[in-house]
Amino acid sequence: MKNTIAGIHHITAIAGNAQRNYDFYTKVLGLRMVKRTVNFDDPGTYHFYYGNENGTPGTILTFFPWEGIVGGRPGTGMATDIGYSVAQGSLDFWAERFERNGVKVQPQTQRFGETVLPFQDPDGLNIDLIVPREPDSRVPWTTSEVKADAATKGFHSITLTLKSIAPTASLLTEVFGYELKGQEGDRYRFITPAADTASIIDLVEAPQGARGLNGGGTNHHVAFRVPNEEVQMEFREKILSRGLHITPKINRDYFYSLYFREPGGVLFELATDNPGFTVDEPLNELGTHLKLPAQYESSRAAIEKTLPALNS
């Protein structure tokens, strides 16, 4: 489906201490550090990318770890919960692992016929491990402690919490090609038929909910997947035609991006599959070097001195 959004490309969140973030996502959750670079708009801050072996779209969780940042507050106008897909029978492993590592974890629950284990990362970011109804055939990144039968396979879903879901639902269905598949209370599930995984957007309607506040432990934006720049620019025209402001195309080295705020206030991005994370590092070395965008390469020494030391 050339002109349909192919699910989630990546999700970007805000963290505090860089070392703590790195240790949790690589050692406790068992993800691969796919790319270590800097915030293109703030080169004194890291930008970490975690995912599977290749950093395949639909597996990529990224962070801006701003040292000492004040904690945020999830609420309306924000992406509030990240869902990861895991295998049947793995949730007891994760519950025990989280408890042993001091992770805030809640009891398992059911949602749309799927079993969910909610937890929070060290900054308070809300994440769910979800056993999907349909088998997920993606090959996960594994570690010595997190084996293939338990490892996260990539995104299952993202939850947006909104005062009213109608304008956002209209954008998802009329522009992005999503379809409403179900409702449980104030939660509405939308799925794109153009992807088998990372395909679900849940909209939670909270008319009386407090407005979210960005800070540590909150999501910054959600990026949706398009195959290339041609399709990306077709979507740009569609979004402009709805009266929404959208940026020009921006080169993020590993993909091309457009940004806009959807009607409910959540920052959306459209990101391309090309060129990918091996454009400046071989596959077996992904995430092992500090990679800088070209405009900052001449300042490498000063940037490396400014960034916190990171022990891998």
Image: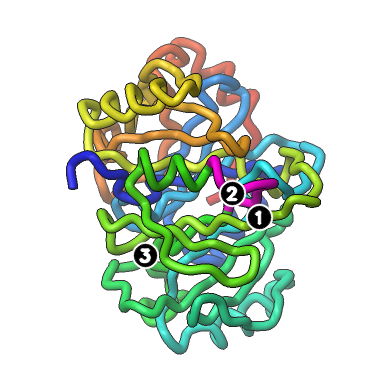
Q: Residue at position x 47%, y 56% from top?
A: 201
From the image, state whether disc 1 or disc 3 is nearer to you: 1
Q: Is residue 2 magenta?
A: no
Q: Amino acid at mark 2?
A: Ile
Residue carrying label 1:
205
Residue 231, by quadrant, is top left
Residue density around tag 1, few if under 14, some if 14–19, many if 20 or more, within 10 Å: some
Instruction: Find residue 141 and name its label.
Output: 3
Region in magenta: 160-167
Across and down, in percent, residue 196 comes to 28, 63
In front: 22, or 244?
244
**On the image, numbered disc 2 is attached to which residue?**
165
Question: Is the residue marked by circle 2 packed among few (<14), some (14-19), or many (20+) residues within 10 Å?
Answer: many
- Cα gap from disc 2 to disc 1, whole angstroms: 6 Å
**Badge nearest the viewer, 2 or 3:** 2
The mark nearer the N terminus, 1 or 3, is 3
Q: Position of residue 60 (x, y in %)?
A: 42, 50
Q: Residue at x 80, y 51 (%)?
A: 208
Q: Are marks 2 and 1 in contact (CB under 8 Å)?
A: yes
Q: Residues within 10 Å of mark 3 (few under 14, many from 20)?
A: many
Q: Is residue 204 left or right of residue 146?
A: right
The residue positioned 44% from the left and 26% from the top of the image is 242
